[in-house]
Image (cartoon, rainbow, N blue to C red):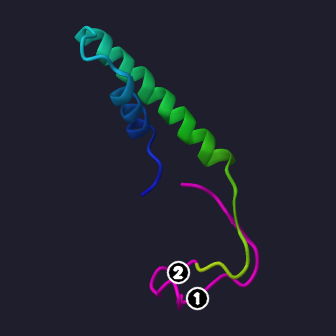
Amino acid sequence: MGMNGVVLGDAIVDLIMSPDAPAHMQTRIRELWEGIGQVIVKHIQDNAVVTVDSGIPVDNTGTQQQPAWATVAEGTGTVS
């Protein structure tokens, strides 16, 4: 599953929102955090680089003891 800024924002709101806040403020706060979440996710997707050392199992069809295949050289990728 890819990163989702709206889901991130909603998760933050669920942690910080006071149930006593007026409904219009709850809506506004949720909208703000959804937007902040989207900015955070976009920044990570645009800037993160993942490096995998050689020999690291990268295929989930094998087992931990006998991976189907592993990296043979360092590799880089992006975050989605």
Q: Residue at 63% of width from left, 58% of height from top?
A: 78
The answer to whether 49 is drawn above or below residue 33 in the figure is below
How many tags in the picture?
A: 2
Which x, y percent locates residue 63?
A: 47, 86
Residue in the picture at 57% in, 40% down: 42
Q: Residue at x 69, y 82 (%)?
A: 55
Vertical placement of 77 versus 37: above or below? below
Q: Nearer the viewer, residue 52 or 44?
A: 52
- Horizontally, is 35 left or right of 48 in the view? left
Q: Quadrant of the C terminus?
A: bottom right
Residue 54 sits in which quadrant?
bottom right
| Residue 36: x %, y % from top left | 50, 28
Indicate yes or no whether the magenta region holds residue 65: yes
Q: Which residue is mark 2?
A: 59
The residue furthest front is 65
Q: Residue 33 lies in what quarter of the image?
A: top left
Q: Residues within 10 Å of mark 2 (few under 14, many from 20)?
A: few
Residue 32: image location, x then y, percent: 43, 21
Q: Which mark is residue 69?
A: 1
Q: In terms of secondary structure, where does tag 1 sit? A: loop
To which quarter of the image does residue 8 belong? top left
Pointers 2 and 1 in contact (CB under 8 A)? yes
- Image quadrant holding the N terminus, namely bottom left
Q: Earlier in the sequence, mark 2 or mark 1?
A: 2
Indicate the amino acid at tag 1.
Trp
Q: Which mark is residue 58?
A: none
* C-alpha gap between disc 2 and disc 1: 6 Å
User: Would you say the magenta stretch is mainly helix, strand or loop?
Assistant: loop
Q: Which residues are magenta?
A: 58-80
> Horizontal and vertical percent for residue 29?
38, 17
